[in-house]
Image: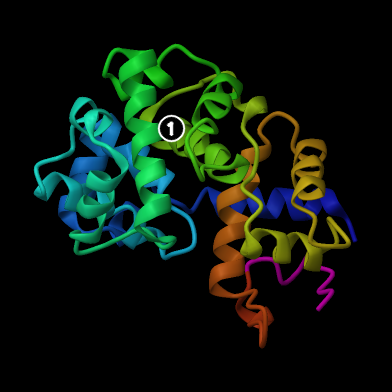
Amino acid sequence: MDKSAVVERLKEFGETRSGSDWSALDCATSRLVRRNPFAFLLAVAFDRGMPWQRAWRIPVEIDHAGCLDPARLASMDELDLMKLIDGLAVRPRYGSRQGAKTLSDAARLVCQRFGGDAGAIWNGASPAEVEKTLREIYGLGRGIASMATRILRDDFGCFKGQECQIDVKPDVHLVRVFRRVGFVKGDSANETIRVARRLNPEFPGQLDWPAWRIGQQWCHATEPDCAACPLIRVCARRI
């Protein structure tokens, strides 16, 4: 199997993408997350263990509760934050206690280090610096941090010329595709990241969306739809 051919096909498929699937969001969520950097920060911080469209709705629900203000959230104790989360129409997957820790960390980070402006986390910073900062928030790991930098690059115009620092997010869909096309042998997240860096060093994260989308839509864990897959002509099909 020619790995370079797979890389090129992934990149070609990636060109069919328009934005970060914003059309999958309701209008209120899309509008708030695009316009409010703190809402974007919370959206990606809660984007784990649940459908991303619901996770990204959480800042809207916090806004409806009148609390989408980092200074106000930073001043609230854990019990008050848990009560806030328990009262939301959409709540974090891992419950109010862990959600409160994420919310508190994000608000305090913005207030104490960035003068209340969440956008200052990434404006003028490198992707590596941003990832390091984001990972200070409870529950926000390496994969979500990489995803956030890719979205900031693709949809908000950040990090031009620094794409070599943006990695893939090794979730189950992407790792499955990488394994089946022959890029990796197992399910190691670290190996997946290393391979993406080696195969597309100028912008590893460029392989993220196309592989994720293919894994989600065609390369299912069971009964993959190989005939309809964009990689049909180049995939090793190690199923």
- The quadrant in which the N terminus is found is bottom right
Q: Residue at x 29, y 57 (%)?
A: 23
Report the amino acid beneath label 1: Leu
Say which quarter of the image contains residue 101.
Answer: top left
Graded by Cα atoms within 10 Å as few (under 14), some (14 to 19) or many (20 or more), the crowding at tag 1 reads some
Left or right of 128 in this view: 194: right
Please identify the quadrant where the C terminus is shown.
Answer: bottom right
Choose top left, top right, bottom left or bottom right for residue 42: top left
Q: Which residues are magenta?
A: 230-239
Residue depicted at 67% across the width and 26% down the height: 164
Residue labelled with disc 1 = 152
Left or right, 219 with respect to 4, comes to left
Total numbered circles: 1
Measuring 23% from the left and 35% from the top, which residue is drawn there? Answer: 76
Principal secondary structure, stretch drawn in magenta: loop
Q: Position of residue 200 (x, y in %)?
A: 74, 38
| Front-most of residues 189 and 178 | 189
Residue 209: percent from the left, percent from the top? 55, 52
In the displayed structure, 235 sits above or below 207; it is: below
Inspect the magenta stretch and tell me whether residue 223 lies in it: no
Q: What kind of element bears circle 1?
A: helix
Q: Is residue 73 above or below residue 120?
A: below
Q: Which residue is painted at 63% across and 67% down in the image?
A: 230
Q: Is residue 151 above or below residue 234?
A: above
**In-image side of 76 versus 191 (left or right):** left
- Location of residue 138 in the rendering, given as x and y in whole percent from the top left corner: 49, 40
**Residue in front for this viewpoint, 68 or 8:** 68
Residue 48: x and y in percent read: 48, 56
Q: Nearer the viewer, residue 5 or 91?
A: 91
